[in-house]
Image (spheres, helix red, strand yellow):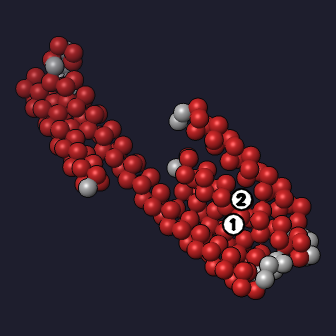
């Protein structure tokens, strides 16, 4: 993450906190002016959360943004806007909430795939290193569990082969993801 992204995240967090402060002031107030202020604060909160999710890649921000969009849509119906304008804005906010939920699902899928790829890569590297360790009799000193050199070499060759196979599966998986 670059310095610019870091400062951008800080800016959106500051806007999110400001929206939360406005929500805290007006949450119990039932006047129409307060309702207008509430839906704007929910909207600002949702926008900040969407941008934080985009910048950090965390799906939890998108879920929170979807909830904020839905609360904003509910508050719009209680505001001072005219009937047609209220319905249009509420529909638009509900659409935004649905899109935020879709972003959240896709981010979770991407996060899960990334964990799987890192796991396969780790296993592949581990098998290669341990296999090479068993193959080199100079490093082990031929003293692995009192086994003969030939057995240890076969075991090392098997581990190297498994490391290559896992590496091949990782490459195939990454190529499919690119298509």
Q: Are marks 1 and 2 in contact (CB under 8 Å)?
A: yes
Instruction: Work out whether 171 lies above or below 20.
Output: above
State the image quarter where residue 179 is shown.
bottom left
- Going by the image, does 34 lie left or right of 70? right
Q: Residue at x 77, y 51 (%)?
A: 17
Residue 111: % across, % down:
44, 52
Q: Residue at x 24, y 29 (%)?
A: 130
Q: Earlier in the sequence, mark 1 or mark 2?
A: 2
Outermost bottom residue? 83
Q: Does any portion of residue 100 appear in the rendered image?
A: yes
- Going by the image, does 77 lie left or right of 67? right
- Going by the image, does 97 lie left or right of 11? left
User: Mark 2, residues whose alpha carbon is within 10 Å: few (<14), some, or many (≥20)?
Assistant: many
User: At numbered mark 1, what does the secondary structure look like: helix, strand or loop?
Assistant: helix
State the image quarter where residue 62 is shown.
bottom right
Which residue position is annotated with label 1? Answer: 68
State the image quarter where residue 37 is shown.
bottom right
User: At numbered mark 2, what does the secondary structure look like: helix, strand or loop?
Assistant: helix
Q: Residue at x 50, y 67 (%)?
A: 102
Which residue position is annotated with label 2? Answer: 45
Instruction: Work out whether 71 lies above or below 103.
Output: below
Residue 5: % across, % down:
58, 38
Residue 9: % across, % down:
64, 43
Q: Does any portion of residue 173 appear in the rendered image?
A: no
Residue 75: % across, % down:
77, 75
Task: Give the number of callouts.
Answer: 2
């Amino acid at each position: 993450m670059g310095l610019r992204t870091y400062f951008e995240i800080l800016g959106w967090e500051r806007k999110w906190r400001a929206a939360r402060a406005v929500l805290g002031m007006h949450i119990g107030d039932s006047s129409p002016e307060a309702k207008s202020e509430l839906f704007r604060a929910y909207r600002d909160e949702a926008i900040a959360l969407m941008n934080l999710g985009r910048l950090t890649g965390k799906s939890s921000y998108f879920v929170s943004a979807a909830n904020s969009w839905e609360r904003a849509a509910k508050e719009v119906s209680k505001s001072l806007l005219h009937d047609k304008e209220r319905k249009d804005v509420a529909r638009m906010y509900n659409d935004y909430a649905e899109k935020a939920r879709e972003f959240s699902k896709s981010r979770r899928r991407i996060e899960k795939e990334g964990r799987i790829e890192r796991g396969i890569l780790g296993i592949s590297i581990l098998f290669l290193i341990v296999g090479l360790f068993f193959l080199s009799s100079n490093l082990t000193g031929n003293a692995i569990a009192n086994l003969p050199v030939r057995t240890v070499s076969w075991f090392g060759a098997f581990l190297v082969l498994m490391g290559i196979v896992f590496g091949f599966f990782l490459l195939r998986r990454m190529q499919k993801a690119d298509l």
